[in-house]
Amino acid sequence: MKCKFCDKQAVIKLRAYNLKLCHEHFVEFIEKRVEKTIKKYKLFKKNDRILVGVSGGKDSLNTVYILNKLGYKTEGLYIDLGIGTYSEHSKEKAINFSEKFGMSIHIYEVKKDFGMGITEIARLLRRKPCSVCGVIKRYILNKFAHENGFTVLATGHNLDDETATLFSNVLSWQEGYLARQDILLPQKQEKLVKKVKPLALISERESAAYAILNGIDYIHEECPNAQGATSIFYKSILNQIETKQPSTKLRFYLDFIRRGKKFFESSLQEREEQLKPCEVCGYPTTRKVCQYCSIKNEVQKRRG
């Protein structure tokens, strides 16, 4: 199997694009697609300071690596969630990556704020770990970015993540979530940093191959709290469709961005109009007290 652009042996076949690529041309293909996404959707410019939420997984590490390689001012933030050996292993991957490639990654420990990790917090509050985790991660990432002078907050969400979320939200017609699903969420409030997803058009398989070919060591295991998550089920369904009809996921997502999202813009505008400073921390929320501060207060109460 020869590369489409040279005589070298192809290392991967991309059915969605009808391409067979060698090591060099595949890496170039991914980086060009990310650069095209950045420019087409006006995600950020060379003078922006970009903070990437790093998990130790392939997608977030690829994001830091690619953006730095493309010449953007990029640093990472790893949030130690305190989820047993999983967090230990993922933090090790983030630190090793930082040392190997000379790229700055900050470490933030949830235990310093709560005195315990995500699993213990969820158990104490009798809530699902993923719901608690999502609130805490989003808050810390935004707060850290705002307080440290970053103008953009990037995450490593890939095409599979985005289509699974879109599929789920369409099945239940979650208008609020559909309104906010995009490659770019512009800054609407002073303390809400602009959020972007540079890898949103890169599939999970493509991202994994890119990491391997560039010597990026990442954590392969799933978070133990994610077992049985509906997102994993939806990904498996979409993968079956993709096998039969290549490029379905890309068309599904891009068609929503181009043609479908506009029908939910009123929901987004309504939410933005409801935003006001949290009475405890001052960060924007639709409630009197934001979810992060509510969780923190409840943890303190129950611990006595």
Image: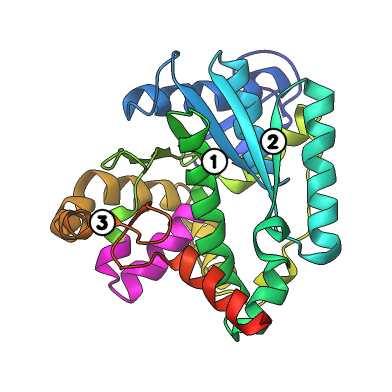
Q: Position of residue 266 (x, y in %)?
A: 13, 57
Q: Amino acid at mark 2?
A: His
Q: Is residue 138 magenta?
A: no
Element under disc 2: strand
| Marking on residue 106 | 2
* C-alpha separation, residue under disc 3 versus residue under disc 1: 19 Å
Mark 3 surroundings: few (<14), some (14-19) or many (≥20) residues within 10 A: some
Give the magenta-colored segment's residue range. Answer: 161-177
Residue 104 visible in the displayed image: yes
Q: Position of residue 53 (x, y in %)?
A: 59, 42
Q: Amino acid at mark 1?
A: Phe
Secondary structure mostly seen in magenta is helix
Q: Mark 3 sits on what residue?
A: 276
- Total numbered labels placed on residues in the image: 3
Measuring from the top left, give residue 87's x and y in whole percent: 79, 57
114 horizontally vs 132: left or right: right
Q: In the figure, 186 relative to 230: above or below?
A: above
Q: Amino acid at mark 3?
A: Lys
Q: Is residue 287 left or right of residue 158?
A: left
